[in-house]
Amino acid sequence: MAWRVDLYPSKARTKYEYGPKGPEMMGKISVSEPRLTPDQVAPRVIISGKISQTALFVMGAGGSWIVSERFKDIVESLEPGIHNWLPTDLVYADGKRVPEPHYFLQVGQTLDTVIFERTAFNSGVSATGEHYVTFPKTDHLMTLDREKIAGKHLWKEKYAGYQDTFFSNELIKTLKKLRLGRGFQLFDCNEETAP
């Protein structure tokens, strides 16, 4: 079983302090390539407003994810060396640093696993002439190729939106076992063998 994952919105607000090559590269963090370097993302993120411990584990920030070292370690235990973890300091508005290290997550693999004949979707053309596909946020309306996702734990889909991220069932089970599954909005995907 695979899961399409969204993050519940955080009530905290974020402000990026950019390095010498930011912010123009920040939009690239939601795709696997090109692989970014730490000087291309914000070295400090200032958070203000109410922030929960769940948001400090994994937080959405402007289309990208800022993740804790705990999340990084869990993913690396399942898929070592695949993803790009770009360090950033989380700092409260009063200047106090969040003690646990955090990273911008650049998912390291984009797969082409959607079986469109068995998936509900909408398509269109943007104002710039680009074709796009959107998938409903409902369980069991998306079908992925079982063989193509075998052994994969965290990925982006070639035809899904930039915010769509996918987890394996094993990753979800690990997070839930450690009581770290809160904060994720999960949509169950069907898995089948492609025709």
Image (spheres, helix red, strand yellow):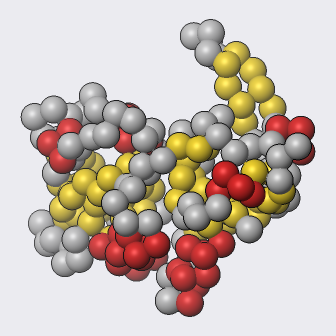
Residue at the image point whose x is 18% and y is 62% from the top: 89
Residue at the image point whose x is 60% and y is 37% from the top: 158
- Residue 148 shown left or right of residue 28 in the figure: right
Residue 155: x %, y % from top left: 54, 53
Image quadrant containing the N terminus: bottom right
Residue at the image point whose x is 20% and y is 39% from the top: 40
Q: Determine whether 69 is above or below 35 in the image.
A: below
Closer to us: 14 or 141: 141
- Residue 120 visible in the shown view: no
- Residue 190 shown left or right of residue 127 in the figure: right
Residue 82: x %, y % from top left: 39, 56
- Residue 120 shown left or right of residue 43 in the figure: right
Quarter occupied by residue 76 = bottom left
Residue at the image point whose x is 83% and y is 46% from the top: 194
Count every numbered label the image shows and give the total.
0
Residue 195: x %, y % from top left: 88, 43
Q: Determine whether 69 is above or below 128 in the image.
A: below
Closer to us: 173 or 164: 173
Quarter occupied by residue 121 = top right
Closer to us: 73 or 89: 73
- Residue 190 visible in the shown view: yes
Residue 80: x %, y % from top left: 37, 66
- Residue 161 shown left or right of residue 125 in the figure: left
